[in-house]
Image: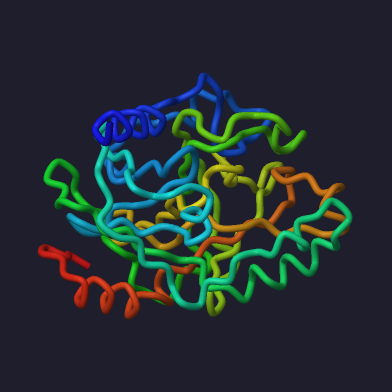
């Protein structure tokens, strides 16, 4: 029975529905957002939805909240199911209380809660990964103003209409570009722009992209600078729609947590950490 349960869990992780992912421009063909590049091999799928990124042979970095929906006992990476040895959630992570997500709740209270949380976690795999090159971490503190990539297999829509309300949260991989608009103590912020000033492949994250990578190029290499986390909202929770042009998204600022990452990996053990 244990082997059967393990097989079924991995099968669920491998499911990919015929839909879109990452919220895109309304005037650009979806095919232009689809890519098959080496960095994608380092992107892990968590159970049912959400992502993580391989940063060392035995370690995956993700957003803490993406590990709270379902037990993380296996992940999918490069088409293979990998068993998990342990999950390490940052002690500063603060789960969002249900009262703040109620339909009539003021979104401002939820946003304040999210902004004060350390939404980051590490997943230690049972065995080192030998068929995927881990992504290097972006170590600079100059992220603001730089071109970035956002990747994910979550829900989708276009900037004109926003996220489709009932779209699947585990779809096909998409990549979009944006510019880091702000970099504060915890977060990288960026706006989904439209018009002539927007990138030809402008986009933003969707539901289910949590923990997915925000990449910044350095010395010819795309490095992990952020992890998809949350979107700014105003007014009542029931009236808020994400994904429209002008929406502002926030990603965990990886450079803030470099010391924490290195310390956890060093104390819990991992050969070959390249960052």
Q: How many numbered circles are shown?
A: 0
Query: Vertical placement of 42 versus 113: above or below?
Result: above
Tell which of 46 and 186 is nearer to you: 46
Q: Position of residue 76 (x, y in %)?
A: 32, 39
Q: Is residue 129 left or right of residue 49?
A: left
Q: Is residue 258 left or right of residue 175?
A: left
- Residue occupying the point 35% across, 59% down: 61
Q: Position of residue 113 (x, y in %)?
A: 68, 71
Residue 220: tell me if it is visible. no
Q: Position of residue 225 (x, y in %)?
A: 41, 63
Q: Is residue 239 left or right of residue 94?
A: right
Query: Vertical placement of 59 versus 186: above or below?
Result: above
Q: Quadrant of the N terminus?
A: top left
Query: Vertical placement of 218 versus 12: above or below?
Result: below
- Residue occupying the point 44% across, 33% down: 173
Q: Is residue 222 left or right of residue 147?
A: left
Q: Residue furthest front?
A: 1
Q: Residue furthest top?
A: 18
Rendering colour mode: rainbow
Tell which of 71 and 127 is nearer to you: 71
- Residue occupying the point 55% across, 69% down: 187
Determine the image quadrant of residue 184: bottom right
Q: Position of residue 5 (x, y in %)?
A: 33, 33
Q: Quadrant of the C terminus?
A: bottom left
């Amino acid at each position: 029975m244990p082997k059967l349960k393990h097989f079924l869990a991995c099968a669920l992780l491998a499911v990919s529905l015929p839909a879109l992912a990452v919220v895109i421009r309304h005037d650009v063909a979806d095919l232009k957002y689809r890519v098959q590049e080496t960095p994608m091999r380092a992107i892990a799928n968590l159970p049912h939805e959400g992502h993580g990124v391989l940063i060392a042979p035995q370690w995956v970095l993700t957003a803490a909240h993406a590990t709270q929906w379902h037990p993380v006992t296996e992940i999918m990476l490069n088409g293979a199911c990998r068993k998990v040895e342990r999950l390490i959630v940052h002690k500063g992570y603060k789960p969002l209380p249900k009262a703040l997500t109620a339909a009539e709740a003021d979104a401002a209270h939820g946003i304040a809660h999210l902004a004060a949380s350390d939404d980051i976690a590490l997943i230690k795999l049972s065995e080192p990964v030998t068929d995927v090159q881990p992504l290097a971490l972006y170590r600079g503190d100059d992220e603001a103003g730089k071109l970035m990539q956002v990747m994910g297999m979550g829900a989708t829509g276009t900037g004109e209409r926003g996220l489709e309300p009932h779209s699947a949260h585990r779809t096909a991989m998409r990549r979009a570009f944006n510019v880091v608009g702000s970099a504060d103590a915890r977060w990288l912020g960026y706006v989904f722009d439209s018009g002539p000033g927007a990138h030809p492949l402008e986009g933003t994250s969707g539901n289910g992209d949590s923990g997915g990578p925000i990449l910044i190029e350095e010395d010819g290499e795309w490095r992990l600078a952020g992890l998809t986390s949350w979107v700014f909202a105003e007014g009542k929770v029931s009236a808020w729609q994400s994904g429209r042009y002008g929406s502002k998204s926030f990603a965990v600022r990886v450079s803030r947590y470099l010391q924490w990452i290195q310390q956890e990996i060093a104390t819990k053990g991992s050969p070959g950490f390249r960052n």
